[in-house]
Image (cartoon, rainbow, N blue to C red):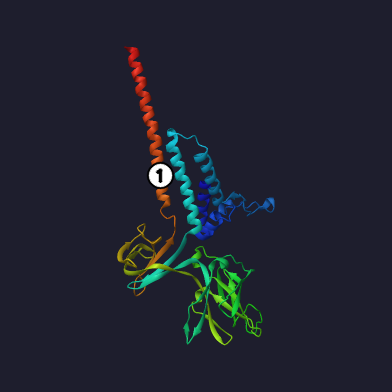
Amino acid sequence: MLLVLTWLSTLEQPFKGLYEVQKRYYDAEAWYVVPDLPWLYLPDFSFLGGFAGKQIVIPLPGAYLVSAILFVNLCLGGIIRIRKGWKNIGVIISHFSMVSLLFAGFVAHKYSKEGIMFVMKDDVSDYAQSYYDYTIEVCEIIDGELTAPYVVPAEPLKKLGPADVQRVNLPKLPFNLDVSHWMRNSNVVKAPMGDDNPLVVDGLALQVAENATLEEENAAGCYIDILPNSADGRKVRLLLYGPAGGAVTATIDGKIYGFTLVREIWPMPFRVRLNESVGEYYPGTSKPSFFMSEITRLADNGEKKFTIKMNEPMRYGGYTLYQARWSGETERPQSGFAIVKNPSDQWPKYSLYISMLGLFIHFGMKLFGYMTSSSNKNRKSASKAA
């Protein structure tokens, strides 16, 4: 079943995008999935009436559920209930490796974090930005400068739908927020003059856009209602749009506050200086055929130089940096590093080593037993002949 789900999700990825397919097939909430592929639709049988273009519904259990059942099955049948003894030690070790491999997948699914870091040549960066998740930053503006922001967590926001309203309490600020009309991908459009639609703010409104195949290309948007704590305070509605960049301001109790919808940012325990960024494009295209980066890692234990290439990442402090993007069209070359924080990053490799050991022991014992048995038979045959 895991093989079938992996095959179908791989076929579906070019049409729906990696992010959407992962959610549909592999999330813990995805108890079942209905494959959606072009060849899973009925052909044009209009003469039969009403059957043309209908999807063939094939419900399958989600990969997370299948993996959980396999985990329990391996624990009970392959470790607990299996006949113990030296003859089965190799099989037990191999089963244990598969259990640890599934557990590593669970840890990665539950606790891993992914983002990207863009660095221009000769610049230094110390933070990563999420591919998918957005946060709302709220900060007071004093003398034109932004103060330290209060960050609305991404977790409640990414669960919102267009019809949902999320109340956000800000105990250290003189107001709370209501986040509504969340759009995973949106456009900002000009509204007709004189339109009294409550979703029109300063002549602008958000319009739902079709989700992009690549999730990182989606531009989130939403509305926020600022709810002052004071009795005479008046509700203020703002429109937030991810790609806008700058903060949208509002005056509350005589103070100016800025509100920004940005992709979630998380600090790194080290800094990265990009010393050199080298790459080549396929002839006649803007698609890189090769790229690599020479960096200096700046951490508490000093500086150290690394060369990051495809499949040659840098690992440090629980983080892994992969070469993911390159752009040589700007005045200074720029590298994009995919950053993964995964507690079980190396566990699959160790699990495979354990599996190899178990299989080597098992088949080695079988071979030794076969050779011993054959040798005894030859001796008996020779003694009978004598």
Where does the image place residue 27, in percent across and percent down from the top left?
Answer: 55, 56
Q: Quadrant of the N terminus?
A: top right
- Give the residue at x 69% y 52%: 49
Q: How many numbered marks have been drawn onto this rendered protein structure?
A: 1
Task: Tell me which amino acid carries mark 1.
Answer: Ile
* 82 to the left or right of 315: right
**Crowd class of label 1 (few under 14; some 14 to 19; many from 20; radius 10 Å):** many
The answer to which of 120 and 348 lies nearer the viewer is 348
Q: Is residue 153 shown above or below 230?
A: above
Locate residue 121: give its quadrant.
bottom left
Where does the image place residue 137, in percent across and percent down from the top left?
Answer: 52, 75
Residue that carries the numbered disc 1 in the rendered image: 354
Whether residue 131 can be seen here: yes
Q: Quadrant of the C terminus?
A: top left
- Give the residue at x 42% y 43%: 355
Outermost residue toward the top?
Answer: 386
* 351 to the left or right of 303: right
The answer to which of 354 and 200 lies nearer the viewer is 354
Locate residue 371: give its quadrant.
top left
Q: Is residue 180 shown above or below 17?
A: below
Where does the image place residue 64, in percent across and percent down from the top left?
Answer: 54, 52
Whether residue 286 can be seen here: no
Q: Is residue 284 shown above or below 104?
A: below
SS under mark 1: helix
Where does the image place residue 155, in percent across and percent down from the top left?
Answer: 55, 66
* 10 to the left or right of 43: left
